[in-house]
Image: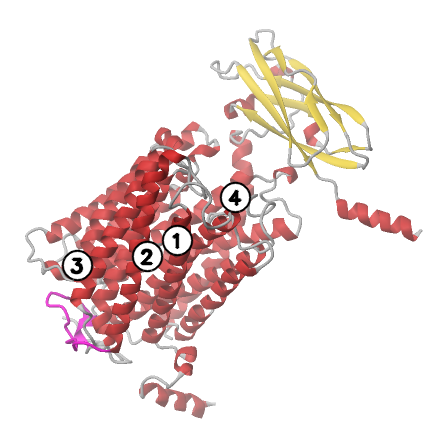
Amino acid sequence: MSAVIENHHEDHHHGPAKGITRWLYTTNHKDIGTLYLWFSFAMFLIGGAMAMVIRAELFQPGMQIVEPEFYNQMITLHGLIMIFGGVMPAFVGLANWLVPMMIGAPDMALPRMNNLSFWILPFAFFILLSSLFMEGGAPNFGWTFYAPLSTTYAPPSVTFFIFSVHIMGASSIMGAINVVVTIMNMRAPGVDLMKMPLFVWSWLITAYLLIAVMPVLAGAVTMMLMDIHFGTSFFNAAGGGDPVLFQHIFWFFGHPEVYIMILPAFGIVSHIIETFSRKQLFGYSSMVWAMLSIAILSFVVWAHHMFTVGLPLAAEIFFMWATMLIAVPTGVKVFNWVATMFRGSITFETPMLFAIAFVVLFTIGGLSGLMLAIVPADFQYHDTYFVVAHFHYVLVPGAIFSIMAAVYYWIPKWSGNMYDERLGKLHFWLSFAGVNITFFPQHFIGLAGMPRRYPDYALQFADWNMVSSVGAFLFGFSQILFLFIVLKTVMGGKKATGQVWEGAKGLEWTVASPAPYHTFSTPPKID
Amino acid sequence: MNKGAKKTLIKLIVAVPLMFAFGFALVPLYDVFCEVTGINGKVFQSEYSEDLVTAEGRPIALQFISTNNENMPWTFKPSKQVMKIETGEYHNATFYVKNTTNKKMTAQAVPSVAPSNAAEHLKKLECFCFEQQVLMPGEEALLPVKLLVSNDLPSNIKNIILSYTIFDITDYNEEVMAHHQMDME
């Protein structure tokens, strides 16, 4: 037995294994990070293709291309795939690549669990996507799967959906546990909590949120499963249950979930703005406290998603104020980013462009969120395209721009090659234009009263919908350019130095580019 | 793995089933919260109480609404749509129900009160919604409600709506089984 272990150990020091088994059996944080990132890219393209179907159908009023039933399946899968397959695994991939290098650790604390948490994900999404070909079609009840629409009235494939959510949840929980154990126990001597890079801080907080709410989501889908198959009545009014209860449980998970999708972005953007402003980040400790307070507040604001279900006045007022309170720490962060740039000697490389766009556009999304927090106004905006515009502004130029910024910023470290700056800038400007042309008009049609989740709309919304669709196609096809840029960089290009960026700080820049297969096998010295 | 890491790991692994259980605990918590505050418009059975009866009541309107859930084929309607009542007095109301099918069926009515802050002041001594209704083919019935609106009702409420939705909860599997058994005999 011990001989086997020793052998294994020796292999380990020679670098990666060859062929497909390298990826199947790998316990190396860099390999697993790469797997997560490519997986999320694939999901981003699949979910994006679904968005293209949606915008093609909405290009003109009337039913044009798809059946309404299929349209409903598209909006459901688009949401689920982008959230659970696109944004979340991308952040886990970044955490895998960066957290150990940033804290001077040789690997993640639980490398085998790391392998497992990645490799169950493709199965979850295979199950979810296969429901498209089942009798009755894929889930069609929206990504929020409100009961009883998702229980009594659901297609038979809902059981597969529930199973796939269970797997996604297990994967996220394992990933989060791994991140917490790594950060809490494997920091190199001298990396104190309040000296940790902000990306590490943001992921520590995110991981705690994941551990707190993913099991609640698992509970919600388990109750659905029991209502559908075992005759319970959690959400069935006839049996004494309550459909509104579903919404409470779902949003108790759902609101922390939206911060799970944005906190790592805060960390990324802080690093990039600091580097390209060639200044120290303004207000490091206030950044940490702001993220902590956002995370804590996220547990007491969930009912702002349900202002129209008939909450008592006292509850509406409480959730309104609690929600508005989140604007304070978020505002602190935005001011800190701006103050970091102020009088900095800024250069506008692609990561910086994405980061600045993040600050501006995420703030727009945040402000429309404040409008939605106002109870009487929300009665007007609820379930309109205004809401769609709001959450796409925080998720696309928010979360996804931050991921793209991170890829451009760290890909020289990952691959050892510089990306093509000219193509990167082109990709940025196409995406920037695409996002705004797509989602800004949705504010107008939402305020004018166009409801979300319908395949057809009244004629007065026709013009802005057409504009929005044109923007969506522009944004969608620009991402093929992104794929091309990434592939081109991985395959070759100008060699990157270890430092890569003139102003970059942090342990990951002290190792060579590409980062060796094993880094910090002995802890680095920190002054 | 060092000791500290193991400790962190164990804490986190324990947290996961606890949070899973918390998700389920939200179900009874929600019910208790609603029962205490009455905010989801649910009304529970209350005991007869002399203290609630008073001659100094004020007039209010009590409206009844009946709804059939999904494909529930029964006829279901209030005998009177509006009752002018006084607070602090017990009143009787009835709902007419008829099984219009040629099958024995079981039904359950689920109540709701609007405005929701009136719910805690609505005291039901007796309600058909506290039990299930079994009707033979073509059978009809008058279902009773006995209630009192407490004098503590906020003075801005002059109109209370009591709504019932009737659900078909017949166990069709059991029926099929019964048929099978009859065939066997």
Q: Earlier in the sequence, mark 4 or mark 1?
A: 1
Q: Amino acid at mark 1?
A: Ala
- Residue A246's mark? 4
Q: Does residue B139 lie above or below A88 as drawn? A: above
- Residue A476's mark? 2
Distance from Cα at disc 2 to Cα at disc 1: 8 Å
Range drawn in magenta: A492-511
**What chain does mark 1 sit on?**
A
Q: Amino acid at mark 3?
A: Met
Dominant SS type (magenta): loop
Closest to the camera, between mark 4 and mark 2, is 2
- Residue A432's mark? none
Residues at marks 4 and 2, common chain? yes
Residue at screen point 50% across, 16% down? B157
Q: Earlier in the sequence, mark 3 or mark 1?
A: 1
Distance from Cα at disc 3 to Cα at disc 1: 27 Å
Q: How is the image coloured?
A: secondary structure
- Residue A51's mark? 1
Q: Amino acid at mark 4?
A: Phe
Residues at marks 4 and 3, common chain? yes
Closest to the camera, between mark 4 and mark 3, is 3
* SS under mark 2: helix
Whether the residues at callouts 4 and 3 have beta carbons within 8 Å, the answer is no
Residue B175 placement, left or right of A228: right
In the rendered image, residue A210, in percent from the top left (x then y), is placed at: 40, 56
The residue under label 3 is A352
Residue at screen point 17% across, 51% down? A337
Q: Is residue A360 magenta?
A: no
Residues at marks 3 and 1, common chain? yes
Closest to the camera, between mark 4 and mark 1, is 1
| Quadrant housing residue A239 | top right
